[in-house]
Image: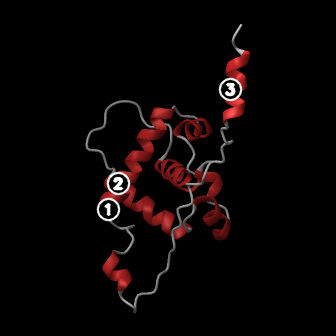
Amino acid sequence: MTYEQVKSLKPEDFKRLCGVRPETFNQMLEVVRSCSQPKQKTGRRSKLSLEDQLLMTLEYWREYRTYFHIGQSWGVDESTAYRMIRKIEDTLTKSRAFTLPGKKRLANSDYQLQVVIVDVTESPIERPKKNKKSSTLARKSNIH
């Protein structure tokens, strides 16, 4: 789904899809545009526009799919998806316009927290219990 298809969504739906409001997306886009002005770029032009590259990066952050799957859905190679996402991430990080407040600022009682980020990627894996009986039977049955 390209930016041209997404930009006409309602702001609530846009946020559900990308994880950011359309205003924040536009601010991110301006930062990426201002920082990615090449002096003399050689080689082939990118298949995806800056809007699509930013949308792909937000999709990676939101859904945490593999570069292979993101590349397949955007019609680019896995390495190209990785390179584009890293470029956008590095640009946004260097701009320091989209950083979370530090520990000291959060410790102040007068500061109101506006964003809560929860990392729920880890979950325990249920594995079958190994017992001596099942492994012994398997070993005995392999003996001829």
In the rendered structure, which disc, 1 or 3, sits on the residue that comes first in sequence? 1
> Mark 1 or mark 3: which is in front?
3
- Residue corresponding to mark 3: 136
Nearer to us in this view, 122 or 46? 122
Q: Amino acid at mark 2?
A: Thr
**How far apart in space, not on screen, are marks 2 and 1 (Cα)?**
6 Å
Vertical relation: 92 (above or below) 98: above
Nearer to us in this view, 68 or 31? 68
In the rendered structure, which disc, 3 or 2, sits on the residue that comes first in sequence? 2
Residue at left 69%, top 11%?
A: 143
Position of residue 88 in the picture relative to residue 139 (left or right): left
Position of residue 70 in the picture relative to residue 89 (left or right): right
Residue 98 figure quarter:
bottom left
Q: Secondary structure at mark 1?
A: helix
Q: Amino acid at mark 1?
A: Ser
Task: Provide residue 7's location: percent of width, then percent of height.
Answer: 61, 59
**How far apart in space, not on screen, are marks 1 and 3 (Cα)?**
61 Å
Q: Secondary structure at mark 2?
A: helix
Q: Secondary structure at mark 3?
A: helix
- Residue corresponding to mark 1: 95
Nearer to us in this view, 91 or 128? 128
Q: Amino acid at mark 3?
A: Thr
Where residue 91 is drawn, which disc sits there?
2
